[in-house]
Image: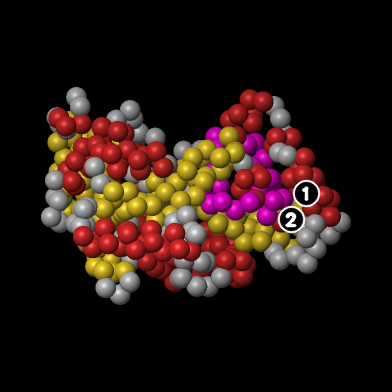
Amino acid sequence: MTADKLEVSQEPVVTPEQLREEWEDLESRSAPTVFLSWQWLGHWLEVYQPNVRVLRVREGDRLIGLGMVVASDERRHGLLRSRCLRLHQTGHRVLDQIWIEYNGFLAEHGRDRDVSAACLAFLESQRDAWDEFVVGAIDADEADFYARTMGLHKHIRWEAPCYGVNLNALRRSGQHYLDTLSRNTRYQINRAHRLYEQRGDVELVRPDSVEEALAVFDSIGPRHLERWGNGPDQSGFANPDFVRFHRSLIRSQWAEGGVDLVSVRVGDDVVASFYNLLHNQVVYFYLGGMMTETDNKLKPGLLGHSLCIEDYRHHGFHYYDFMGGDERYKSNLGQCHRQLVQIALQRPRFKLKLESALREARNHWLGEPGAGYGR
């Protein structure tokens, strides 16, 4: 059955329990990333309670697709008001700083494009209800498909490559992870390891309780703020709603194995800590906090990631995903596996065309390739 034969409905959430049952049933028939799992989106609903409309895609009596959209107004430049639909985001800056990645519609295995096309056609039919459909962060190829399907202008608000390490391939090769890296990166990690060993034993440690896990997360905060700053779109630890979401996620998911807090201890000192999301044997590195060292030969981040990668490989995980970001350490430690974008698919409104023309003129004048979107 083709996408145009599928039935799409849009309904409010009746009860969280009903939606959870539907979502987890469909999830069992698909292979979503953590960000399209109930592990993440169910928690998003519980903590932020956004006013979502649920898109359900059915093939006869069979549910094969789901998604949640939120309507909100966005004001820009002090004058422009745009009515936006967002997929799995609220439209409130402080709430969306948790930054969903690998976004899209949840679809039965093998039906991804059919479900997406059906949902997009349904939203396109509501042409008078919204000005922009905002989706982020989504695979760049999928974003192109969305734009072609809807026949709308695609404005890229943010983009970044994704890097990661294929742990299955690493196991099959029989190589040590460090042997897959460039000579320079391998040298830096080995040198840091030797120097740290002069201070004491180097080991990975994990919390023994959820309270200890929360304490590790809290301890990352000052180091993360020092590294990324406390302004808008900088460190999430400056945002109480970001901290509230993740502390609640840790409290609900740590015992279930949905999150992992792991630290690198050197003697009595913790030199690096990592907060990872775990789903379907994939590790999603979410954030970390590293000790600031005066000796630049000491690389707590590089060393910590390399130790974590070997540890997760040993425990049978499939992939270690650094996710979106063009930071140098990610390209040094992993291989690029996709490009992520945040897009706004824009209807042909005069106000949006004018804004686009002014943006292009400004970028041409300043010599900039385009506007970004801070994470």
Above or below, 370 against 172 in this view is: below
Q: Are marks 1 and 2 in contact (CB under 8 Å)?
A: yes
State the image quarter where residue 134 is shown: bottom left
On screen, residue 206 versus residue 46, left or right, reads: right
Q: Image quadrant for the N terminus?
A: top left
Which of the two labelled residues, at mark 1 and mark 2, occupies the earlier sequence position?
1
On screen, residue 355 versus residue 8, left or right, reads: right
Residue appearing at x 58%, y 30% in the figure: 168
Q: Secondary structure at mark 1?
A: helix
Q: Residue 188 got which mark?
A: 1
x, y percentage for residue 323? 51, 47
Mark 2 crowdedness (10 Å alpha carbons): few <14, some 14-19, many ≥20: many
On screen, residue 225 versus residue 365, left or right, reads: right
Above or below, 7 against 287 in this view is: above
From this viewpoint, which residue is outermost toward the right? 198
Q: Residue 215 got which mark?
A: none
Between 373 and 189, the one lying in front of the other is 373
**Range covered by the magenta-colored residues:** 301-328
Residue appearing at x 60%, y 34% in the figure: 167
Can residue 105 be seen in this snapshot? no
x, y percentage for residue 216? 59, 62
State the image quarter where residue 80 is shown: bottom left
Residue appearing at x 67%, y 40% in the figure: 310
x, y percentage for residue 212? 58, 62
Magenta highlight on residue 311: yes
The amino acid type found where label 1 is placed reads Gln
Tag 2 residue? 299
The amino acid type found where label 2 is placed reads Lys
x, y percentage for residue 120? 23, 42
